[in-house]
Amino acid sequence: MDNASNPEIRLSYYITTFQKLPYLKVVLQDLIDNRQPDEEIVIADGGSKDGTVEWLEQLFAEKKIQYYTSAPDRGEAHGVNRALMACKGQLLKWINDDDVFCYPAIAECKEFLLTHPEYDVVGADGFDNYTGQELELVTHLPHFTKWKNEKEPFGFYGPGLMIRRSALTLIGLTHALSRFVDNEYTYRITSLPIKMAWYRKPVFVRIINPDSNTLKFINIKRVEQGLNDVYREIATGRPVAQAKRERMINSVKRKVYDLIYRRSSTIVPEKYELTDFGTLYAKHRATLYEAYKTAKGEAFLA
């Protein structure tokens, strides 16, 4: 495989998938409809047996996607790394196979990085259905400000991430042991001496669903936090015990919040049952695009 970048390709969208054809068909069609001539779509399938491979073959033959591979992998990180290694664009954009994305917002992030070559990464926020009840706009702006002022690392959702390909020599690929791949990757990125800007308009809607990795691996998330604690200690020199105390305080605050507003932040599969992903996708897409259009203030905090 030729790993050299192609100057004619400015942006690579990379997607991993496994046994999720009903989701992928909806998400990928939206991406195909919005892909620009200087962009490519790269897909790494983990060896699906649900018709995904045949559909990807058809899309590739029709030149609607530019690269795909299908082979058993050893977890999502392995798949992400396969996709990253195949990308040829100057910029790399993470796309999940079951989330909604705002392509005009992505275009603004793309233009920012192309016109500001001194920046390595753009991060962004989006909506989440974490409670399983309604969408909430999740903001990491306070974390970004603290990172900018104090170099305090933080994790954020992979769908909000855009990377300059040349920065991979510093950032590296994703950690193959991680199950919460984007959390580890973004925490590591913010632990490194990179230059990052924050995009202040919503870029995505994260849809937790019965087939999400979030539900599959939620029980080991606390274990993986230990890796992020190591990054934090190395980057800041502050002991791990301090981070653990802060998490305990935040956990209590979240429980109080849930009691006051009669909500639950606990993730359980029953909250995320769905019957028609296409209908839900269209609904959340409308919400996302409206929020993008009505967003006020400067687009980037740099």
Image (spheres, rainbow, N blue to C red):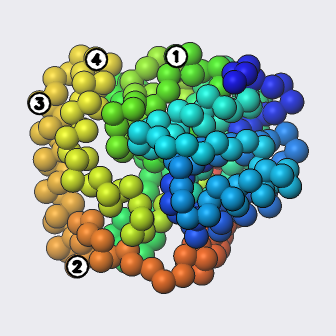
The residue tagged 3 is 241
Q: Earlier in the sequence, mark 1 or mark 4?
A: 1
Q: Few, some or many C-alpha atoms within 10 Å of disc 3 (few <14, some 14-19, many ≥20)?
A: few
Picture disc at residue 234: 4
User: Label 4 to label 3, Cα distance in Å?
Assistant: 13 Å
Q: Quadrant of residue 88?
A: top right
Q: Is residue 39 above or below residue 164?
A: below
Q: Few, some or many C-alpha atoms within 10 Å of disc 4 (few <14, some 14-19, many ≥20)?
A: some
Q: Nearer the viewer, residue 60 or 26?
A: 60
User: Label 2 to label 4, Cα distance in Å?
Assistant: 39 Å
User: Label 3 to label 2, Cα distance in Å?
Assistant: 31 Å
User: What kind of residue is marked 2?
Assistant: Arg
Task: Tell me the residue at 45%/31% (across/down).
Answer: 174
User: What kind of residue is marked 4?
Assistant: Ile
User: Label 1 to label 4, Cα distance in Å?
Assistant: 16 Å
User: Label 3 to label 1, Cα distance in Å?
Assistant: 28 Å
Q: Is residue 21 above or below residue 84?
A: below
User: What kind of residue is marked 3?
Assistant: Ala
